[in-house]
Image (spheres, helix red, strand yellow):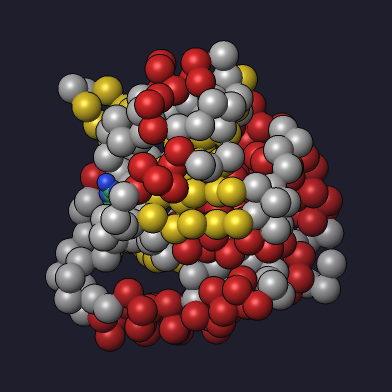
Amino acid sequence: MGKILNGKELAKLRADKLKETVKILKNDGIQPLFCVINIGDNPASKLYVRTKKRQAERIGIEEKIYQLPNDETEEDVINLIKKLNADPKVYGVMVQLPAPEQINVNHLMETIDPAKDVDGLTPSNMGRLWQGDHFVEPATPSGIIAMFDHYGIELAGKDAVIVGRSNIVGKPLAALMQERNATVSLLHTKTQNPEYYLKNADIVVSAAGQANLITADKIKEGAVVVDVGINHVNGKLVGDVAFDEVKEKASWITPVPGGVGPLTVESLMEQVVKLTRRANGR
Ligand code: NAD
């Protein structure tokens, strides 16, 4: 039976350490502060923004939320980002995604100062990620790598499959895993014969957003299985992995909830502190 990759526990461990670092900064008069811009009233986004704020408060980080109406223009959001870029008290700026359709997210990402890019999604930081010269990383992939490190899961020489190629999870995670010398296949809805890749994979990361996508018959005996998916089925929060059956075949597995989610939030906090320290020459 697979052992549990306990994201909740690891996130707490890392947060306790981070709290100490923040205490030292605050003693020296430096207050880590980041701003989250949320456009519209997507209930999931509002929940994520609140979850981040709670975690930030626990660590001693200040999070300022800019809640904008659903019909906000792209120009106004860009002007707000520029204002925050110019504010020396602000160390991090991020936009909660998704954004309403009148807004081109790429234009927002191009506007965020790369030195304040807590989410690691600006073109220059994404480019640096692929060049192997990065300072910030998108939060979910960063949390997953921290989890591999903590549990001693070796990536070098392993065949890894990531299901889902979004800019926030699949693509940056592929960059980070190949940097650790894994051989990475990035699967998506147009992939022919996904079973072929899955059955040969030593490590499977699913970030598709489809319940029961990864079943026991699809994976290799002893595979490491990481479930990024968040799905609501009959009022219950589940991932992409059929946990009960897959855990019998996997060597390691993340639960949902309590796996990747808490590490994502914690990794974001790590990046706020990283950028705060760098901006203050620490
Ligand atoms: P997305 O929703 O933008 O895109 C989904 C991706 O999965 C696409 O690339 C699509 O091609 C692929 N895909 C969908 N169904 C597939 C299938 N049947 N076979 C192969 N590929 C398939 O991606 P996202 O924003 O990365 O989100 C993915 C999931 O992860 C969602 O459930 C989201 O809620 C969740 N998520 C969780 C966290 C966390 O912290 N736990 C963070 C980010 C996203």
Would residue 147 appear left or right of 41 to someone viewing this image?
Answer: right
Image point 83% across, 51% down: which residue? 24
Q: Position of residue 80 (x, y in %)?
A: 39, 78
Image point 65% across, 47% down: which residue? 158
Q: Quadrant of the C terminus?
A: bottom right
Q: Position of residue 188 (x, y in %)?
A: 33, 56
Q: In this orientation, which residue lies closer to the viewer: 210 or 6? A: 210
Vertical placement of 42 versus 272: above or below?
Answer: above
Q: Position of residue 248 (x, y in %)?
A: 49, 16
Q: Quadrant of residue 40?
A: bottom left
Vertical placement of 230 versus 217: above or below?
Answer: below
Q: Taking the image as drawn, is residue 178 in sight?
A: yes
Q: Quadrant of residue 108?
A: bottom left
Would residue 26 appear left or right of 33 to someone viewing this image?
Answer: right
Image point 72% across, 51% down: which residue? 156
Q: In this orientation, which residue lies closer to the viewer: 79 or 123? A: 123
Would residue 224 appear left or right of 192 to someone viewing this image?
Answer: right
Vertical placement of 75 versus 54: above or below?
Answer: below
